[in-house]
Structure formats: C-alpha cells, structure tokens
Image (spheres, rainbow, N blue to C red):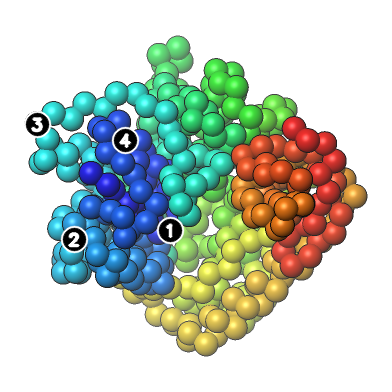
C-alpha cells in the first residue's frame, strides 16, 4: 500500500509523522512523496491558532481533491473537533491524540491479521519532508494551564518517554544518515518530572539527565533542543553546552515582557526572572542564539503594557523571534476574558514586534560576519554545470547560502560568513567536510 503522510504545526507533530513513516515501512508499505500517488493519507493536524485549524481543514480538503479516497485525520484539531473532521470529504477515520501512538497498529490490524513492527532505520520522509534532521519526541502533554493555550486541552497531562526509548529512536535516525537530532515535546523542559530514579529515591529525573545520556551513549554530530519554558531551567542547566555537539540555540518563549500581562496568561515567569536566566545563559554561551515567542494583543493589554513588553523585548537583544497575534481559542480562559483587543490593534502590535525582532536578528547575525562556522547543508539546487546553490544552518541557527562545485546535501562544511542579505547569510565554503 502506498501511503502519503503530512503534518501541520509544531515539531512534535513532525516527529510523530516521522515515527508513523517508520512503522508503515516496517510493516512493508511504501511512503510516497505525493498525495496523487497514494492509496491512503494520514494528516497530523494542529489547533494552536485559528489559522492553524484552518490550515488543517484546508490540508485535508486538498488531499481529498488530489484523489485520495481514504484519509486518516489525527492531531490536536481532530481531537478538539472530531465531528467537523469526520464531515470532511474522504476522511474515513479520525484518531484522537490519546490513540495517536497506536494509529499505525490500529489501521493495519483492520487490514492485516498481524502487525509486528521490527526495528528499522529511520529514514527522512520523501518529497518536501526530506530532511537532514530528525525530530525525536521525548515528551507529550502539559501540566501548565496558560490561559491562551489550547494544546494542554488537546494533548492532556505531561508524560515522559523513557531514556532507553529515546536513545533507541536517536540511534535509528543516525543509522538512517541523519546528522542532527532535535528533541521535542509539548513541554520539553518537564521531561523526567514523572520518572523517579531508583538510585535517588524520592527524586525525579530532569531534562539534563536525558541530554547527558544521549551525548554519552551516541555519536550524534548535532543535538538541538526545541522550545523550553524558562521556569524549567536554572543556571546549572547551561553547563551542558560544554559538549560542542549541543547546538548553541535556545528557544525560550516569553509571550509578554509585561509582568501584569504574564499574570493574566498564568505564565510561571516574570521579566526579572527571565532576564536573570538570559544573563546566566550568556555567561556560559556568549555567542548563543536566544530566540523567543511573543503574543501581541492579549486580552486586557493596554498601551502601557504593550510599551513595557516591547521595551523588554528590545532589552533582551534576541537573535530572532516569532510574533503571534492573539488568537482566541474556544475552551481557554483567555477566550472568556473581558477587554478583548480589536483585531486591527493586534495586527498593528504584531508588526511592531516583528520589526523589533528583525532589527535584533540582523544585529546578532552581523556579529558573525567574517567568521567561519560549520554549516549542515539541507537543500541543493543546481545553478548550471559549474555549480550548486547550497542552503543550510549553523549550530546557532543562522541560515547560510553558498555555492559548491558538487551537491553537498546532508554534509557539513566549514563556511566563511561574508554578508547578511535578505534573511540569509552569503557564505564561502572554506573547507569541504
């Protein structure tokens, strides 16, 4: 059977769809790059914003129009809106998040008498999803109750995967040729809080224990951490970066630089504690890229609160960031709050945040012009018979373009960074391999 897999939203969704691909292959089925070539499609949906939910519906409709008669819909939007998902064209089954880990087994048990997945190399997905990095799910769910977030409702309580299972996934990915592993979860920093260690009765594991185990027990060339809530970290956490294989990139969602707004969001941080964390990180890793997320126009955000938040964002000198206009999600506390901000005001504040991020990102990038950094090439395009356009990322997530005499996809080269242009750095390959 030919199966097309697609996903909307976060890196965790990407990790889950890659795991499904490995399971389908292990059962003898082919994962194809195009919906037009598929007998069945599986779509992992998202609901973090109204736009993500709309994209999820659009993706399902598009696959139906491509001629796929059997579509399996799963993920957060499906979990929250199963009736709407079932009503879409050619959706033959919905799988809510509580059954997602068993999706492949459930589907194939309906078709085959036996389903026994043997270990198999984790290959990148074909087509647009052909990646040089693998997203490895280490944790799911969240015990926080941020008032704007629908994900907690859709994903349930926090659950950690055992170290041995994570390392097994990492090894499969490395055997498949992946050069970079990204650890991901809904609340990644909470990993281990539900796992007691027999060596220290009464004490739970921490994410640092997982990271150390991966670095110790595998030869992963690059290990990257996805989004981390700031309250899960302390100054000691940053000592992990003594190992150069751990990418110097921290994504720490702030959501607002105003203390009053953070309280309405039910975030377990303050601007002061966030500032102290950034200072501690930069003392250990002065060149690290620290990025963040900001919500523009949260309910009740006054002009003074917005100004306070913007000033704090500028003070932090982030290497970049994502600004999201507040999106009311049914069932969340924020959606019921009074003083909802008008959409046009949210949009205006979002644009101001984006401009601030662009300015600080350019300033961060400029620090590295003239330096030579290793780049993992993620895409190649032949320009002519004399050269190839390469594009990839440094460990601190600078996007780099350079010309090579031969395709270097999924290879790592030392590259001299020459000029920052249009959101990417033009580079010169200094040393092959």
Query: Dividing the picture into quarters, in which one does residue 433 lie?
Result: top right
Could you tell whether 25 is left or right of 376 in the image? left
Circles 3 and 2 in contact, beta carbons < 8 Å: no
Q: CA distance from mark 3 to mark 2?
A: 23 Å
Closer to the camera in the image, 25 or 254: 25
- The numbered mark, 1 or 4, whose residue comes first in the sequence reads 1
Q: Position of residue 188 (x, y in %)?
A: 48, 41
Tell me the tag on residue 69. 2
Between disc 3 and disc 2, whose residue precedes?
A: 2
Q: Residues within 10 Å of mark 1 (few under 14, many from 20)?
A: some
Q: CA distance from mark 4 to mark 2?
A: 21 Å
Above or below, 276 against 271 in this view is above
Which tag is nearer the camera, tag 1 or tag 4?
4
Residue at label 3? Answer: 113
Q: Which mark is residue 9?
A: 1
**At x 63% / y 78%, what residue is drawn?**
351
Q: Which residue is mark 4?
A: 25
Q: For this rendering, which residue is in front, 126 or 248?
A: 126
In the depicted view, which residue is nearer to us: 404 or 25? 404
Q: Earlier in the sequence, mark 1 or mark 2?
A: 1
Name of the residue lying farthest toward the front: 385
């Amino acid at each position: 059977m030919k199966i097309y897999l697609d996903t909307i939203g976060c890196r965790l969704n990407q990790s889950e769809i890659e795991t499904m691909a490995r399971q389908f292959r292990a059962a003898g089925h082919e994962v194809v790059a195009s919906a037009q070539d598929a007998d069945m499609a599986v779509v992992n949906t998202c609901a973090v914003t109204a736009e993500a939910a709309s994209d999820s519906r659009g993706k399902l409709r598009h696959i139906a129009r491509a001629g796929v008669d059997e579509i399996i819909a799963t993920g957060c939007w499906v979990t929250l809106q199963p009736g709407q998902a079932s009503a879409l064209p050619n959706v033959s089954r919905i799988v809510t998040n509580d059954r997602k880990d068993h999706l492949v087994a459930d589907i194939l048990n309906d078709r085959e008498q036996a389903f026994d997945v043997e270990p198999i190399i984790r290959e990148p997905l074909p087509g647009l999803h052909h990646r040089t990095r693998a997203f490895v799910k280490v944790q799911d769910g969240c015990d926080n109750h941020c008032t704007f977030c629908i994900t907690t409702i859709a994903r349930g309580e926090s659950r950690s995967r055992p170290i041995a299972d994570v390392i097994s996934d990492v090894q499969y990915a490395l055997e498949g040729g992946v050069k970079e592993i990204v650890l991901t979860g809904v609340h990644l920093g909470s990993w281990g809080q539900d796992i007691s260690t027999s060596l220290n009765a009464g004490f739970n594991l921490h994410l640092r224990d997982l990271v150390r185990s991966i670095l110790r027990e595998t030869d992963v060339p690059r290990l990257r951490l996805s989004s981390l809530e700031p309250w899960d970290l302390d100054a000691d956490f940053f000592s992990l970066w003594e190992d150069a294989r751990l990418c110097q990139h921290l994504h720490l969602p702030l959501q607002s630089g105003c203390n009053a707004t953070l309280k309405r969001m039910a975030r377990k941080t303050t601007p002061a504690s966030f500032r102290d964390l950034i200072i501690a990180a930069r003392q250990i890793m002065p060149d690290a890229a620290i990025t963040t997320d900001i919500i523009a126009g949260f309910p009740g955000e006054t002009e003074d609160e917005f100004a306070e938040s913007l000033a704090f964002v500028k003070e932090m000198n982030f290497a970049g960031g994502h600004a999201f206009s507040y999106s009311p999600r049914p069932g969340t506390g924020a959606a019921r709050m009074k003083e909802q901000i008008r959409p046009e005001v949210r949009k205006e504040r979002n644009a101001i945040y984006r401009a601030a991020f662009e300015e600080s990102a350019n300033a961060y990038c400029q620090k590295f012009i003239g330096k030579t950094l290793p780049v993992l090439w993620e895409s190649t395009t032949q320009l002519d018979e004399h050269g190839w356009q390469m594009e990839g990322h440094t460990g601190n997530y600078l996007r780099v373009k350079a010309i090579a005499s031969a395709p270097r996809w999924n290879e790592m080269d030392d590259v001299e960074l020459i000029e920052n242009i249009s959101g990417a750095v033009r580079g010169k390959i200094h040393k092959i391999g």
